[in-house]
């Protein structure tokens, strides 16, 4: 027995012009896409943050370049996770928003970022005609 879904093509097509029947699989309805915050890459950020917590922070006398790099990676991922979790909370609550990133300082050995959740701007008729101008600057 073949299970079919409403509006799906039949599992067996009618007999073709040469007398042979053609068998096709029934199409299942498309599953809704999972929310962005459940994507594997976002889960991987949380896992990486947890991985950098192993070992804790050594005493000042025992700090090494590796320990400093571990701390920098942890705090960067932790704070990014904080902002992304808030954005996910807002998304689940039905509040539209997106992350805007501004690099106020970027140079050898230093970066200062401002990451903020802001409302998604309404597209103006001129921007709509040009395309999706609201996403310019996004990777």
Image: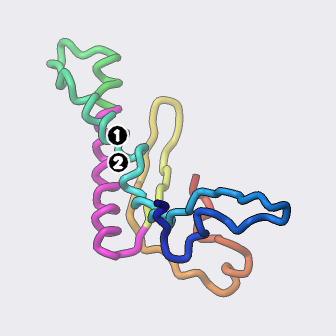
Which quadrant of the figure has residue 85?
A: bottom left
Residue 80 is labelled as 2
Does residue 132 sit above or below 43 in this rendering? Answer: below
Residue 88 spot, x, y in % from top left:
33, 61
In magenta, the rendered stretch is 73-97
Depicted 108 relative to depicted 79: above or below: above
Q: Residue at x 29, y 61 (%)?
A: 86
Is residue 103 found left or right of 42 in the rendered image? Answer: right
Q: Would you say 46 lies left or right of 107 here?
A: left
Q: Residue at x 59, y 81 (%)?
A: 123
Mark 2 residue element: helix
Up-down relation of residue 100 to residue 93 (above or below): above
| Residue 37 picture location, percent across and down | 37, 55
**Gap in angstroms between the C-alphas marked 1 and 2:** 6 Å
Pinpoint residue 77: horizontal percent, then vertical percent: 33, 40
Nearer to me, 92 or 21: 21
Q: How many marks?
A: 2
> Residue 76 bears which disc, if any?
1
Residue at 32% over, 55% down: 83
Q: Secondary structure at mark 1?
A: helix
* Residue 137 placement, left or right of 115: right
The residue lying toward the viewer, choosing from 5 and 68, is: 5
Taking the magenta stretch, the answer to whether it contains residue 26 is no
Marks 1 and 2 in Cβ contact (< 8 Å): yes
């Amino acid at each position: 027995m073949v299970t079919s879904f409403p509006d799906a093509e039949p599992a067996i097509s009618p007999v073709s012009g040469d007398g042979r029947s053609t068998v096709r699989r029934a199409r299942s309805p498309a599953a809704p896409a999972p929310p962005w915050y459940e994507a594997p890459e976002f889960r991987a950020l949380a896992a990486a943050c947890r991985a950098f917590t192993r070992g804790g922070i050594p005493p000042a006398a025992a700090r090494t370049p590796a320990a400093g790099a571990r701390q920098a990676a942890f705090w960067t991922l932790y704070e990014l996770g904080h902002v992304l979790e808030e954005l996910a909370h807002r998304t689940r609550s039905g509040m539209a928003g997106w992350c805007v990133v501004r690099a106020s300082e970027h140079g050898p050995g230093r970066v200062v970022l401002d990451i903020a959740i802001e409302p998604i701007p309404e597209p103006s008729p001129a921007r709509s005609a040009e395309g999706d101008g609201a996403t310019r600057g996004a990777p």
